Structure formats: structure tokens, C-alpha cells
Image (cartoon, rainbow, N blue to C red):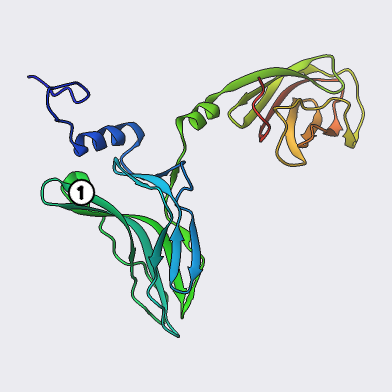
Amino acid sequence: MTMELVTGHAGEPHVTAAQDAALHAGVIGGDDYVLSTKDRFAINVVSANKVTIAGGDLVMQGYHASNDKPADLIITNGSQGQKRNDIICCRYTKVGDSIESANLVVVKGTPTTGTPVDPTLNTTPISQGATTYDMALYRVPLDGITIGEPEPMFNILQPMSSVWDSLTQRSTTWRVPYSSNSVLLTRIGDICFMGGNVKFNNSGQNNYTTAQEKIPEGYRPVSVNTPVAVFGGETTFICYGEANGTVTMLGNPNSAYAGCTGVWRTTDPMPA
């Protein structure tokens, strides 16, 4: 059976929006995403009945929609003594067999003196023949005539470069205090791992004593008092790291053979 070569020249226009959407959905996923471009649909409350949505790109079930300029949206005035949830969404609409569009709209909720609920959106998948589909962007709570802080309802899809960075691996060695041995220090993305075996040369109790050794740049923990090296065996010895590389020691290395383990997060630039 002959298939259609969608990305091939056929002598006449033949590529459909549905085929393009299927490709997008297959590569990035079939859910709804805001892309990490432009201003990612940032929202600004202008007044009691108006918000502005900044530019951005989104993909809903494979269909790409783009907003190049800020867009003003009107929020219907609230009522004293009542609460309401409105939803700002991107609405896909199909008219007839070939006319499709996407628009930013506000779906008004139902006022209540109790706990407000979100209005119903159109959620039947486009791939199942829906002619209207809503991708929720923000929940806008109203308390009386006051607009509350809009609540994002979308996921931001990170670019492939971020995925690559999260898988990038670097390794080095770190010499352990009170020892002539080193352990392996590995970084994958923003997670660091320390492990190995050492022989300690000294004994002595430490009570948060500062070590001469420091954690190298590129592997330093986010916060203070992060356990970077916990030693097992016949020791009670732990090394804690800080974001500036300083290492403090707690416990007694006990001149013993010991195994080392540690896992923590870093925000250092990735080492070369």
C-alpha cells in the first residue's frame, strides 16, 4: 500500500494542518503546552475589569498558536458579596471543513456566596473531531468587585537544549579530609553524586570543624549544611558543604576504612 509522503513534493498543495499537528503531537506530546518563547503569555492586571496577556507561543494537542503582541481582555465586573472564577483560555475553533482559528477568550464563571468553581471548558480532543477546544491559561478569581492574583494553569515546555543540559555529565575527584585518598565526584544535570572508598589517617572528634579541602566549582551545593559526604563503616564522620565550597566536618574518622556516599543539587555553571 502506498503511503503519503507528507514532507515530499507532490506537484500540488497536499499537507494538511491535521498532519502537521500530528507531527507536533508525536514529537513533543499530545497535551497542552506553553513554549519557552517570547514572554510566555505573562499576565498583568490593568484594572478591575481588564487584564493584558503578553506575547507567547503554545501548542495544544499538536496545534501551534502564536500571539505576537500584547492582548487586552475584559473581565466582566464582579458583584458585591459574591465570588467567581473566570478562566482565560486559548480557544481553537473549526468552521466547516477547512477554516480553523485560535483566540484568547475569557470564560465567565458562576457567581456564588460560597466557594466558587471553575466554569466548564470545551475539552473534547481535536483529534476526535471537536470543533471547539479550550486550553486553560489562567484562573482569575474575583471577590466582590476585586480581581485577585491570576493563577497559571499551563505547563511550560522546556526546549531540547534544556533537556540536553539535564543529561550532561561531568566528573572529577575530591580528596577527602584526614586521608590521602580521593573519591569520585560526578555531576549529571544539576544533581551531584559523591562516592568511593577511603582509608583515614587520623582519629579525633570534630564539632563542625572547617576542613582545608573545598568542593570544586561546578559541584557546590545550593544551601548550607548540605551533607556531601557521609561515611559508613567504623566511622561516625560526615562532611557538610556550602555554596561557596566550604566544607565543615562532624564526627570522628576513627583512622578507619570507610565507604562514602552523597547526593545533592547545585546551581553552579556546568564545568567545561
> What count of labels does the image hold?
1
In the picture as drawn, the residue positioned furthest to the bottom comes out as 80
Name the residue: 13% across, 24% down. 4
Label 1 packing within 10 angstroms: few (<14), some (14-19), many (20+): few
Q: Residue furthest top?
A: 180
Residue 184 x/y as whole percent = 69, 18
Residue at (47%, 74%) from the top-left corner? Answer: 48
Q: Which residue is mark 1?
A: 100
Q: Is residue 154 left or right of residue 215?
A: left
Q: Quadrant of residue 246?
A: top right
Q: Residue at x 9, y 19 (%)?
A: 2
Question: x%, y% of residue 143?
Answer: 47, 77
Identify which amino acid the numbered label 1 is placed on. Answer: Glu
Residue 93, position in %: x, y? 22, 53
SS for callout 1: strand
**Is 64 in front, or is 127?**
64
Q: In which quadrant of the rendered image does the C terminus lie?
A: top right
Apparent side of residue 181 relative to residue 196 in the rendered image (left or right):
right
Q: Residue at x 39, y 64 (%)?
A: 73
Question: In the displayed structure, would residue 164 be above or below residue 88?
Answer: above
Asked if residue 6 is positioned above or below residue 22 in the image, the reply reads: above
